[in-house]
C-alpha cells in the first residue's frame, strides 16, 4: 500500500505525518525504532518513552500512486499543522514544491544520503548544484523523485521480468 499515514498521540493530540511506498512495512519500522528507543524523531520518541504504546494510534490517511506521494505528504502536513501540533521537524510550507534537498530525497526514496549522492554522481538522478565551490550541496527536481518512484512501482521495470 502506497500512501500517507499518521501516528497520533492520543494524550496530547500531536501528530506525525508520513508517506511510504509500503505503509505496513513502514509502520513496523516505526514500532521497532520506538520500542528500541532509537527513533529519529526525537519528540515522538520522548513522548513514546513517557507514555504507553496504547496511547499512540496509527492511521492510514490516503492511498495514492507513487507519483502523487510527495506532494500529497506535503499537502497533508500543511493541512494538519494548521489545526494540530505535529511531530514532523520541518515546515512543509517552506519546502519548494519543484525541488528538494538530498536529505528530503533520501527520506522520500527510503535510501541513505550517500546512496542519493552516488545516484547523482552516476547520473541516474538529475540534480542542480547550488554552490559550485561546495562539495555536495544539491537541489533535486521533484519530477526526478516522481520518476524514480514510478519506476519502482512499474512492474515492467523490475529486474528479471520479461518484457
Image: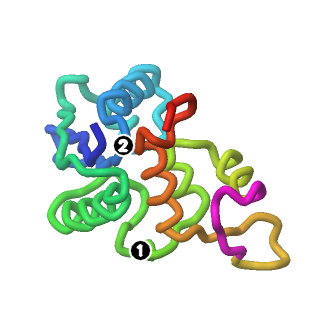
Q: Position of residue 1 (x, y in %)?
A: 27, 36
Residue at label 1? 97
Residue at 39% in and 21% down: 35
Q: Position of residue 115 (x, y in %)?
A: 68, 45
Image position of 152 (left or right of 7): right
Residue at label 2? 20
Position of residue 65 relative to residue 47, above or below, is: below
Question: Which of the two residues, 162 or 54, is positioned nearer the viewer here?
Answer: 162
Image position of 157 (left or right of 7): right
Q: How crowded is mark 1: few (under 14 residues within 10 Å), some or many (20 or more)?
A: some
Residue 154 on the magenta segment: no
Question: Which of the two residues, 129 or 81, is positioned nearer the viewer here?
Answer: 129
Residue 125 on the magenta segment: yes
Residue at 61% in and 59% down: 102
- Range shown magenta: 121-129
Position of residue 78 relative to residue 114, above or below, is: below
Residue at 40% in and 35% down: 45
Position of residue 146 relative to residue 23, above or below, is: below
Residue 69 got which mark?
Answer: none
Question: Which of the two residues, 66 or 72, is positioned nearer the viewer here?
Answer: 66
Amino acid at each position: 500500500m502506497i500512501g500517507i499515514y499518521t501516528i497520533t498521540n492520543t494524550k496530547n493530540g500531536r501528530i506525525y505525518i508520513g508517506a511510504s511506498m509500503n505503509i505496513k512495512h513502514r509502520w513496523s519500522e516505526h514500532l521497532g525504532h520506538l520500542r528500541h528507543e532509537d527513533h529519529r524523531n526525537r519528540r515522538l520518541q520522548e513522548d513514546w518513552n513517557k507514555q504507553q504504546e496504547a496511547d499512540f494510534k496509527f492511521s492510514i490517511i490516503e492511498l495514492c500512486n507513487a507519483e502523487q506521494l510527495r506532494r500529497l505528504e506535503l499537502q497533508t502536513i500543511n493541512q494538519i499543522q494548521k489545526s494540530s501540533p505535529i511531530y514532523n521537524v520541518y515546515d512543509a510550507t517552506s519546502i519548494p514544491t519543484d525541488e528538494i534537498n538530498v536529505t528530503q530525497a533520501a527520506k522520500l526514496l527510503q535510501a541513505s544520503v550517500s546512496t542519493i549522492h552516488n545516484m547523482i554522481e552516476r547520473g541516474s538522478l538529475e540534480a542542480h548544484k547550488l554552490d559550485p565551490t561546495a562539495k555536495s550541496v544539491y537541489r533535486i527536481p521533484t519530477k526526478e523523485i516522481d520518476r524514480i518512484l514510478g519506476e519502482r512501482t512499474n512492474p515492467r521495470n523490475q529486474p528479471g521480468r520479461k518484457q
